[in-house]
Image (spheres, grey):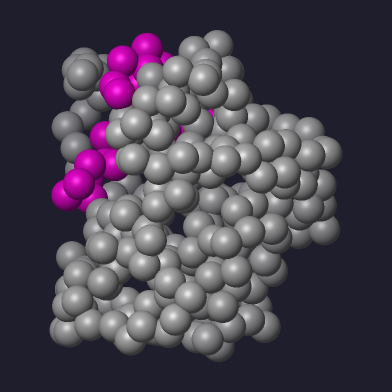
């Protein structure tokens, strides 16, 4: 369901709305689609559209097909990321999965930048770490095999084999698990993972320049545990998924309020890489899925 946002202007190119942004332009697909070398252990090595090498799981049905064919996932999100990150930036990838956005972020932040990558799934984390090392970014990438939240301790990560990008520590019903297992044809399982807050992990960092977050419905808790680092991030630009149907409505609204209280502007990104400003939380809550771009003016 798409809601009209009567108080908002028409979509505009993001480079017109974000200070200092320069549009990279539409991303070209890689020159050799469907190419790859099987490395054994259900891993294939292929290339991204940038020419960087990339290890991917042959079991994966979400990321790997797109990486093999196009050398990228989510072209509009990728275009925004490579356009907004500058040399020297501090880049944070929350829910890094196997590292596609981590590699792009580390590449664009050089020279002089930092990458902080967070991924709780042990299998995805190993591939993410290898992909950063293989492309020469191991020295500037701070990798953390943890789930971020608003507390410290441990949580159970629900993993859906073949669809690991949908793994989550949010509370989900047995009906949701059964439905997903039936749809994917694969049994899921749980893995105990460490949990921490972004404020605690990045307590010594002056601020974040660009942050990408995809936590499968746990975004409100992550924002709640990142208030301090976000407040002191004077050049913050954040790309995040917002899916109200899988979120607790009260938590989702509290997250939007927190972002606004931090002085941030909320935009919705469309597939043409245009932005529409949303000042009405009800309008955002009425949309089933959004890629939000949150910036400090």
In the image, 250 versus 87, the foreground residue is 250
- Magenta highlight range: 259-288
Q: Tell me if residue 114 comes above or below residue 202 in the rendering.
A: below
Residue drawn at (38%, 20%) of the image? 245
Residue drawn at (37%, 25%) of the image? 179
Q: Is residue 262 magenta?
A: yes
Residue 225 coordinates in the image, percent (x, y):
72, 35
Horizontal relation, residue 147 to residue 13: left or right: right
Residue 210 coordinates in the image, percent (x, y):
52, 56
Q: Tell me if residue 148 comes above or below residue 162 in the rendering.
A: above
Residue 81 coordinates in the image, percent (x, y):
39, 60
Horizontal relation, residue 180 to residue 76: left or right: right
**Residue 262 in view of the camera:** no
Q: Tell me if residue 125 comes above or below residue 214 in the rendering.
A: below
Q: Is residue 138 magenta?
A: no
Residue 144 coordinates in the image, percent (x, y):
70, 60
């Amino acid at each position: 369901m798409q809601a009209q946002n009567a108080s908002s202007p028409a979509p505009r190119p993001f480079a017109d709305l974000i200070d200092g942004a320069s549009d990279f332009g539409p991303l070209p697909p890689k020159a050799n689609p469907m190419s790859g070398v099987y490395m054994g252990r259900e891993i294939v090595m292929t290339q991204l559209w940038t020419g960087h090498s990339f290890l991917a799981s042959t079991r994966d049905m979400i990321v790997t097909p797109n990486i093999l064919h196009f050398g990228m996932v989510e072209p509009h999100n990728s275009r925004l990321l490579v356009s907004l990150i500058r040399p020297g930036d501090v880049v944070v990838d929350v829910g890094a999965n196997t590292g596609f956005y981590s590699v792009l972020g580390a590449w664009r932040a050089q020279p002089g930048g930092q990458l902080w990558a967070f991924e709780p799934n042990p299998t995805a984390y190993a591939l993410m770490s290898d992909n950063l090392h293989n492309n020469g970014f191991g020295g500037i990438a701070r990798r953390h095999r943890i789930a971020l939240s608003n507390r410290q301790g441990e949580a159970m990560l629900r993993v859906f084999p073949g669809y690991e990008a949908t793994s989550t520590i949010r509370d989900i019903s047995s009906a949701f698990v059964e439905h997903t297992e039936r749809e994917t044809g694969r049994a899921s399982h749980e893995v105990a993972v460490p949990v921490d807050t972004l404020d605690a992990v990045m307590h010594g960092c002056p601020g974040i320049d660009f942050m990408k977050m995809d936590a499968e419905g746990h975004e409100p808790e992550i924002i709640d545990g990142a208030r301090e680092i976000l407040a002191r991030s004077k050049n913050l630009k954040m790309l995040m998924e917002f899916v109200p149907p899988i979120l607790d409505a009260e938590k989702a609204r509290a997250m939007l309020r927190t972002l606004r209280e931090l002085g941030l502007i909320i935009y919705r990104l469309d597939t043409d890489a245009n932005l529409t400003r949303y000042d009405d939380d009800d309008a955002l809550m009425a949309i089933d899925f959004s890629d939000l771009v949150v910036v400090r003016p």
